[in-house]
Amino acid sequence: MESVAALSNWMLMSTVVFAVLTGILAFLTIGKSKRLVNRLSEDILSSRKQIKSLEKTAEEIRRELLKTQQHQDINQLKLKTSNSSAQELRQELLDARKRLEIAEAAIKEHQARESEDGDGSETMLTLDLELEPEGSLSDNQREQLIALLDPGPKGNVDIFCVMDDDGSELTAKQLDEVLTADGWKTNGVARSAFSNPPKGLLLAVNSKETAPSYASFLQRVFSTIGMDVSARIDKKYREWSLTVIVGSTDG
């Protein structure tokens, strides 16, 4: 009986020891799991901070690149504008030189005829020279106008001439013909009476806000070929369109 009791006590003690060990292991396992969870949480938090830092850095880089690109675009635009202005200036100088050469040749020819013909030079000059109608485009101006209009923009143009002025009407018809052939939309030439007719070409728009972009282009083109050009803003003209008035040719 004593042996049985001793065995029972020993088994009970073993069970208690096993339970204690199991509890200790469970406690250690739970503690380790908590440490792992805490470490994972810290890692996730650290990763989030790193991601936010990277996103902030990426945004700063993007802004810097955008700013750099904008500066490059501005510089390129300035360069294009400068090159365009230089080309326009060179073309104007070439056109002026051509007109000067033509004038010098005409003067030399006139002087040569005067020296050959003596007193009858004025009469002979009047008989020999074929003068173009007053106010009309010369062949040289017409050729230059066609060449300058070709690569440029197109749009709507209303053309008016001074009533009972043959030179004004002829020039207006010539401009209408060239513009129409180049792809511009016109309504032909309309005659209009003016209490104070303009001189040269008058480009009129309804307002600055509704002025078509090609208005300044035509103004430069007409000036380049040697025409006297002025501009006016008047509400009586159509919006988003350009009105070209060929002024009086009377002195």
Image (tube, rainbow, N blue to C red):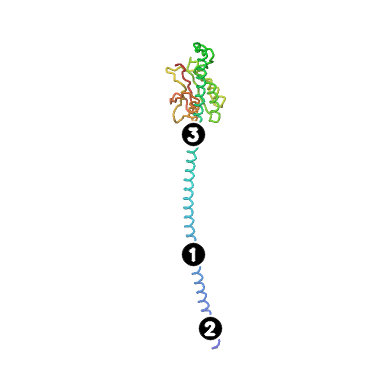
State the residue position of label 3: 86
Identify whether 48 is placed above or below 244.
Answer: below
For image coordinates 55% across by 29% down, the residue present is: 150
Q: Is residue 204 above or below residue 195?
A: below
Res 10 label: 2
**In x, y percent, where is residue 152?**
53, 30
Q: How many marks?
A: 3
Residue 20 point in image, percent of width and height: 50, 76
Amino acid type for the residue under numbered disc 2: Trp
- State the SS at label 3: helix
SS at circle 2: helix
Q: Secondary structure at mark 1?
A: helix
Q: Report the front residue among 173 and 224.
A: 224
Q: Nearer the viewer, mark 1 or mark 2?
A: 1
Q: CA distance from mark 1 to mark 3?
A: 69 Å
Task: Tell me if mark 2 has few (under 14), some (14-19) or many (20+) residues whose alpha carbon lies within 10 angstroms of its own.
Answer: few
Foreground mark, 1 or 3, reads: 3
Q: Residues within 10 Å of mark 1 (few under 14, many from 20)?
A: few
- Work out whether residue 55 or residue 197 is closer to the camera in this orientation and state it: 197
The quadrant of the image that shows the N terminus is bottom right
Q: Residues within 10 Å of mark 3 (few under 14, many from 20)?
A: few
**Residue type beneath disc 1:** Arg
**Horizontal and vertical percent for residue 22?**
52, 75
Q: Which is nearer the eye, 56 or 93?
A: 93
- Which of marks 2 and 3 precedes in the sequence? 2
Q: Position of residue 77 (x, y in %)?
A: 49, 38
Q: Which residue is mark 1?
A: 39
In the rendered image, the vertical position of residue 240 relative to residue 53, given as above or below: above
